Amino acid sequence: MRSMKKKRKGSERLNLPEISRSHCSLERRSRLNKRCREYGVATVPPRSASFLVTPPRGLKRKIGCIEKATQMGRSVRIGDDYVTGGIKIGQGKFGSVSVCRARAGGAEYACKTLKKGDETVHREVEIMQHVSGHPGVVNLEAVYDDAECWHLVMELCSGGRLVDRMRNGPCSEHVAAGILKEVMLVVKYCHHMGVVHRDIKPENILLTGSGKLKLADFGLAIRISEGQSLTGIAGSPAYVAPEVLLGRYSEKVDIWSSGVLLHALLVGSLPFKGDSPEAVFEEVKNVKLDFQTGAWESISKPARDLVGRMLTRDISARITADEVLSHPWILFYTEQTLKMLPVKSKLKLQHAAACHKFVSAPESGLGGIRIDDGSLEDSSPFSSSSGSCNSEYNDDCVWIDALATAVSRVRISETNKRTKLWGPTSPIDQRGSSNMKSLCKAF
Ligand SMILES: Nc1ncnc2c1ncn2[C@@H]1O[C@H](COP(=O)(O)OP(=O)(O)OP(=O)(O)O)[C@@H](O)[C@H]1O
């Protein structure tokens, strides 16, 4: 898993001061939000909100919902507003990320500096402007440019990367469900905004100081419109969807990658592995996953059901972000109302013995400390205590058991018209073949 090593390990705990919006008064912000609401543009939607209107391409820009501070082409220099050149916290293909400090107020931010010239760099800046504002996306505070570079000033995620929390082995189902829900809420938002991320992986999911998850790195993200098929190979080998390798795909690739993430969270290993990118691609295209044996024996049936629905090669059967969010396993672990439903004690006793079959056992032999981090605040997916065998655990068993039966009867997927364009004999796009080389290099 060389790709998992290439970024910084862990992270120094940095103080994360209150974000001061020196560029945009509250009054202006509420005016902008009002304007966006009038046009049905979901700039900062509430969690789990359903979006009434899917904004067409670039609508946010056309109607002036891009905040002034994040607009391109402003005459103001980054040095006027921020002290740059702080600790380097990341290095990517097109630039680096370092800490900067606001001259007004002294708050710290992450500054991503990207060399101008490549079309993908310009696209990253544009897409960041478009999706920034959602609580699950790293917030873009301001954009500056000079002759050579773009400077993206972002909120500083001082909690490090999700991948660094996953190194010690699998996490409990409760924690995995909390993480997946957060990821799917932001994926759903991106898809509603007409954006496909194309590189969902734990290296690109950052944590704030209080443990909130934030999707970052829109370097491979691309716009998509209703019914459009994308071409061109992009992604990270272990997370790439099979249809990307075949040359035609849609936003469903983000569901596949999130399924790979869920697999890794639950059993502590990636589903598709190999000594070379080509070997990984072979597995992505051909391996039949077995959710019945080995580490999966200690995972609940609903959890297995969900991974299977996300990692299906039949694109029309692969579920959408919305469907993942309403899957019984996610609802069970993340919706308080479900937990509060009464459970008869007799039923509890009957099912106590079955617990070990259906709930991820703390001593599952998969090794290592779980990624639950009790030091983080309650709203973080990491604050769950469900990894231990307590009374909540037993209650969970009852519900998980009942859900295992219920879920087998639920039909979640609907045919996705867009994916009908796809066919196994589609030629691999020319641009894709050359991209394949850089993808291999990146791996
Ligand atoms: N807002 C942020 N707060 C804290 N750290 C960050 C932030 N943004 C990026 N980083 C750090 O910098 C690293 C590189 O950032 P990012 O992934 O956006 O760059 P990239 O050029 O696209 O990288 P790559 O080429 O590896 O995909 C991240 O893995 C993370 O460790």
Image: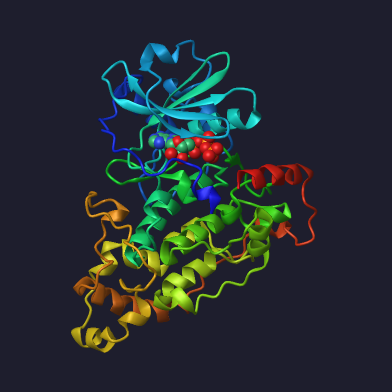
**Residue 42 visible in the displayed image:** no
Image position, residue 249 (x, y; %): 67, 52
Left or right, 214 with respect to 220, comes to left
Q: Identify which residue is drawn at 38% across, 27% down.
A: 87
Rendering colour mode: rainbow
Q: Nearer the viewer, residue 231 or 321?
A: 231
Image position, residue 352 (x, y; %): 26, 84
Q: Nearer the viewer, residue 273 or 23?
A: 273
**Residue 392 visible in the displayed image:** yes
Left or right, 391 with respect to 308, comes to left
Image position, residue 324 (x, y; %): 46, 61
Q: Identify which residue is drawn at 53% across, 35% down.
A: 92
Vertical comparison of 236 with 110: above or below: below
Picture quarter containing residue 333?
A: bottom left
Picture quarter containing residue 11?
A: top left
Vertical comparison of 255 with 348: above or below: above
Numbered marks: total: 0
Image position, residue 351 (x, y; %): 28, 85
Vertical comparison of 389 with 284: above or below: below
Q: Identify which residue is drawn at 36% across, 17% down.
A: 83
Left or right, 175 with respect to 146, comes to left
Q: Identify which residue is drawn at 59% across, 51% down.
A: 251
